[in-house]
């Protein structure tokens, strides 16, 4: 008689890899709490889109709040295909952004030192603190 093995759930994944642990000056695991509005879906427009995160753990560097605002380059593209001739030093294994998901990210701040292009920040009126630039973004599963 043969045996049958069924996996009830995925193996936990911390999102750790050699890229996320060495890039950027800040590394966090954070939950994406809000994507405000829709992404721009135009092939001729490269931009960064600001999203709101709740920090769950700081691995490297320092953040000043439990909530941070992170700009992701061309967020409609999977992170493993987002780098281009304009912005070559971004990436990760995340395929799609969904509110509620947990991401491990390597970040830089201030964004103006790392990205000089269009930024869609729908938090502009209510939040005046730093905007982090996402250098590397991986999914986390518990």
Image (tube, rainbow, N blue to C red):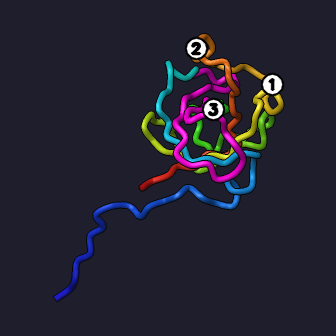
Residue identified by numbered label 3: 70
Q: CA distance from mark 1 to mark 2?
A: 22 Å
- Residue 104 makes an appearance in the image: no
The residue sitting at the bottom extreme is 1
The residue sitting at the left extreme is 1
Residue identified by numbered label 1: 116
In the rendered structure, the answer to whether residue 111 lies left or right of residue 96 reads right
**1 vs 3, front mark:** 3
Q: CA distance from mark 2 to mark 3?
A: 15 Å
Tag 2–tag 3 contact (CB < 8 Å): no
Residue 5 in which image quadrant: bottom left
With respect to residue 23, does 77 lie above or below? above
| The C terminus: image quadrant | bottom left
Q: Residues within 10 Å of mark 3 (few under 14, many from 20)?
A: many
Q: Where in the figure is residue 69, as x and y percent of width and height? A: 61, 29
Whichever of callouts 1 and 3 sits on the residue coming sooner in the sequence is 3
Residue identified by numbered label 2: 126
**2 vs 3, front mark:** 2
| The N terminus: image quadrant | bottom left
Q: Residues within 10 Å of mark 2 (few under 14, many from 20)?
A: few
Whichever of callouts 2 and 3 sits on the residue coming sooner in the sequence is 3
Q: CA distance from mark 1 to mark 3?
A: 15 Å
Q: Where in the figure is residue 56, as x and y percent of width and height? A: 52, 45
């Amino acid at each position: 008689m043969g045996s049958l093995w069924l996996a009830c759930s995925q193996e936990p994944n911390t999102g750790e890899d050699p890229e996320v642990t060495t890039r950027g000056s800040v590394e966090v695991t954070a939950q994406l709490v809000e994507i405000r509005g829709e992404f721009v879906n135009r092939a001729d427009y490269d931009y960064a889109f600001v999203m709101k995160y709740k920090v769950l753990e700081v691995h490297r560097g320092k953040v000043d709040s439990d909530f941070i605002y992170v700009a992701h380059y061309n967020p409609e593209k999977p992170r493993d295909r987002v780098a281009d001739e304009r912005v070559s030093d971004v990436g990760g294994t995340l395929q799609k952004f969904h509110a509620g998901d947990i991401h491990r990210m390597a970040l830089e701040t201030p964004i103006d030192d790392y990205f000089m292009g269009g930024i869609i920040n729908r938090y502009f009126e209510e939040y005046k603190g730093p905007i982090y630039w996402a250098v590397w973004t991986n999914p986390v599963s518990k």
